[in-house]
Each structure stands twice: as structure tokens, then as C-alpha cells.
Image: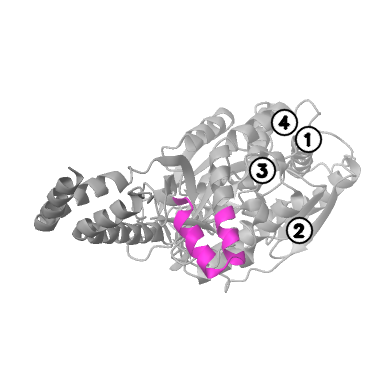
Amino acid sequence: MFEEASEVFDNMFKSSFPLTFIVFIPAVLILVSPLPADAAHEFTVYRMQQYDLQGQPYGTRNAILNTEARTVEAEVLSRRCVIMRLADFSYEEYQKALRQSAGAVVIILPKNMSAMPQDIVQQFMELEPEMLATETVVPVYFAMEDDELLSIYTQTLTSSSSQGSLSAAEVLLHTATANGFQMVTSGAQSKAISDWAITSLEGRLAGVGGEDLPTIVVVAHYDSFGVAPWLSYGADSNGSGVSMLLELARLFSKLYTYKRTHAGYNLLFFVSGGGKFNYQGTKRWLEDNLDHTDSSLLQDNVAFVLCLDTLGNGDTMHLHVSKPPKEGSPQFTLLKELELVSESQFPDVKFSMVHKKINLADDMLAWEHERFGIRRLPAFTLSHLASHRLAQRASIMDARPHVDVQKLSRNTKLVAEALARVIYNLTEKGAPGDLQIFTEQMVQDEQLSAVVDWLTAQPRAAQLVDKDSSVVSTLEYHMGHYLKDVKRHYVRADKRDPEFVFYDQLKQTMNAYRVKPAIFDLLLAVCISGYLGVMYLAIQNFGLLYSVARRVTQPKVKSH
């Protein structure tokens, strides 16, 4: 019986091998074909800045990502998505990924940025300008840490780190058997945003006593800046400046309500857009008022322009000037009043003047008052920072905890007292330096805190705040509550020779798919081919194999 079965199978396989091949191969493919990859995690990523300023490109120029994940510990990073944690981030490793033409870089940020050690925060703040200094074709993304993303990073780190300590054969086997992650973004390639409008707002309090009254201009830019627009909240720079401006508008609007305290100065308040892009809103506002109209407060009698920038912390206050004010001028009067008030009422504040000439050869102006100085208007910037180069002026780390409301309130009261002494000429009238125009109750900490909370509740990068934004409409509402003739001003880039160009695709969804590496498919194909080869030889020689198996398994007959 067994001999007959052997002959039947032997004849069938030998005579019908093509049919056998057709039957067995689909079965094998069905059994070994991988199931569709499941997404291990879906999360939101925020792309690095991409913009052009005065013809110079900055930031990352690419937005598409579809490549396998690695950490910087891997030997080869080319065409790989390099995942880094902020806690372990270094500029050298970042440059290593760019030099090796990585497919992308994803930097994982902690959930609670304020809990990060200050040395790490300060280090990254100082690195942000370097990351943006030159353009790169490598997409750079930031993601907020969660448990799933941290697990992906840990598994990728283990896989990347183990390769350096293994032999070549072990690396090959590990690479073939380990699980990996394919990082894929859902968005399209970035493109320039056409006809984008940067919005600025102005409002005024008219003085009394004549037609040719001097005008004091108070300015603060509202937009924020950092290495990633969607993560730029700009608490101190310049949410604190905007909060102070609105509080000053509220305080002086009360004084201008009554005849006894209605002063002989026009007060012009300007909240500018595009401040982080070389003060584009201020530049256009000056052009509109000085070049394109015959009736403007800026054309008549400007006493001085006071720009407010980064005033929500510290125990120092610096008056940045491009040209030291001459004795007897309104600018000199303000300087002396600031010194007097800080000495008499706020001895814990160290006040000083910082002189820096305007360098027209630089691509970026240092402070906002330089825009006015170029047009020969007397202006200066008030800030608790001693230099425009300090990193906190343009960082995603400038979040709500960077503003101390108590110090912002103190600084607001100091500025309000100094302005009031200038407006009402109190020093020449013999008023002592410790005379308080505004009581502690008049400067409202709750109001300042509420405005800072609102401003830092959403990113205010210039690329994200259009003319219909709630940021603009809410600022307009608050200014209209205290000021008269509140109006908007728009600036759009010239279509032929644009001074600034913004790009889209700054926020995307990224999927991390759990996959086997490409070499796994090759190894699997080799194994299948070997298996099929062995099976083919076994089938072709089935009779021989059967006879050998019979001889081996046949019980031996005992001889007597």
C-alpha cells in the first residue's frame, strides 16, 4: 500500500511541477504576507520657521516626511527621521543630522516647559537663533511629549544604541528582526502665502489748550517669535509691553476725562504688527503718516516716542537710545523723570540709559525705536533687558511663567508716574519726586494679569495672526474702550519685490507606523526561496527519500 502511494505522489510531483508551483506559491505568499501596518501613534507636530526677509531665506524649506525613525546615536542618519529630546539636545548633534542629510528632525519638548532645569532652557534659547540663521532643506519639527511618543523614542533609542556595540552579523540579525517606526506627515509641501496682511492698531487721547499741541507716542508690538511659530507665545516679549500699553491707556483716559486733569499733550497709542520681522507694521505706519497724508499727529509736534518691549520681569530698567537726548528737550525731561521716580519711589529698580547707534548695514534693527529714529523722530525703547541680543526676546521658551505680574505692575506704575510728571510738568512746578499721581489701587494687577493670560493663551506669530484673528479684534475692542479714533493699518508685501514672505504647513499631524525594516523583506525573501528550493528537490527525489525513510524506520528482524 505504501509503495503504491509513493509511486502516485512521485509521478504527480514530477509530471505536474508547474501546477504544484502555482498551487504552493500563492499559499506561501498568503501565509507570509504582512498585515497592513497599524499606526502606533498619531500626534501633532509644529514645523520650524520658514520665511523670507528682504530676499534672504530662513528656516526649513521642506515640509514632507516619510522615513524611518532613528535617534542621533545611530551610525547612519542619512534619509532617516532623527528623534531628539530637548533634555538631551545639543547643537552639535543637530548639526550632525543636517550634515548627514537626515530625512527630518523631530525634537520632543516636555509637557511642562517651566519644570525644565534653567540651564537647559537657557541653552536652548541661545541655540534658537543659530538654528534659524541659515536655511536647511531638512524638515525640522517639534512635538509635545506624551507617553506613546516617549515609548517610541525609547524603543528607537534602544535599537539605535545597540548597533554600535555589536558585530556585523549581530547588527544584521538585529536589524532584520527589530521593530521600527515609519514617520509620516499628513500635510503637503509648503508654499508661499499670497496677499498676507499684517495688522496694526492706533488710538488717541486728544489734548486740550490749543491746536499745535505736542504729541507723545506710546508703542508696543504684539506679535511673538520663536523657532516654531505655533509654539511662540511671547509672554515677556512682548505680551508684557502690550499689557503695559493698554494699562497706560486706561489710566490716562481717566485723567483726560476730567477738565482739571486734561493735559496739553496729545497721547497716541500704537500697537504694531510684524515687530519680529524688522518692525514691518511700524515702517508702513510711518510711511502712511509721513509720506501719504498731509494731516497727521506725527507730522506736527512729536515730543518723543516711547516703545515698550519686554518689561515683565527683572529689577532693572534700561532706556535704549540711538542718540543721547539734549538737555532741555522733552526726551531729556523723560529721562530725568524716569531717574527721579525710580530713585524716589522704586529704589529696588536700577535705572540706566543704554546708547547704541543705528547700524543700517544690519539686516535687522535692534529695537523698535530705531524705525522712528530713521525718520528723524525722537524715540527710545524701555526694557528690562540690557541688550537686544538676549535670547528671551525670540524664543518658544518665553511662556507665561516668564512674566512676574508684581514686577510688571511695578514697572507700569513707574512709567505712568514718569509720563504724568512730563505731561503735567511737575518737576518745574516743584513737586517732590515721591509724589504719587497714581495710587496702588489705580494700577490694577488683575487687569494686567488677565491681559497677559489672554495674550499667552494662543501663539501670536505674525504668520498666524491675520486681519480676522481674535487677537486683533480683541485688542481693537480694548483700545476702543479707552481711546478715541481707533483704526486699523495693514501692510502687505509688495508682489514684485516683497520684503517678507510667509509659508504655510506650519502645523501638521504626524503618524508613527510600526514596521519591519527593509532588510527584513530581503531576508524573508531569501528564506522563502531557500524553503521552496529544498521542497523542490525533495519533491523531485520523493521516491529516493521515501525508500531511505523506509529503510531507516523499518524494524530490524532478529536472526536466530
The kind of residue tagged 4 is Thr
Q: Are marks 2 and 3 in contact (CB under 8 Å)?
A: no
Task: Tell me if I can see residue 498 in this picture.
Answer: yes
Marks 4/1: CA–CA distance: 27 Å
Please report whichever mark, 4 or 1, sits nearer to the chain's N-terminal start: 4
Tag in front: 4 or 1: 1
Q: Indicate which disc, 2 or 1, sits on the residue closer to the N terminus.
A: 2
Mark 2 and mark 3 lie on one chain; the one further toward the N terminus is: 3
Give the Cα separation between the discs numbered 2 and 3.
Answer: 25 Å
Quick one: 38 or 340, which is closer to the camera?
Answer: 38
Under circle 3, the secondary element is helix
Q: Residue at x 80, y 48 (%)?
A: 338
**Residue 406 got which mark?**
1
Q: Is residue 75 left or right of residue 316?
A: left
Q: Does residue 314 belong to the magenta stretch?
A: no
The stretch of residues the image draws in magenta is 158-181
Q: Residue at x 36, y 44 (%)?
A: 37
* Residue 386 tag number: 2
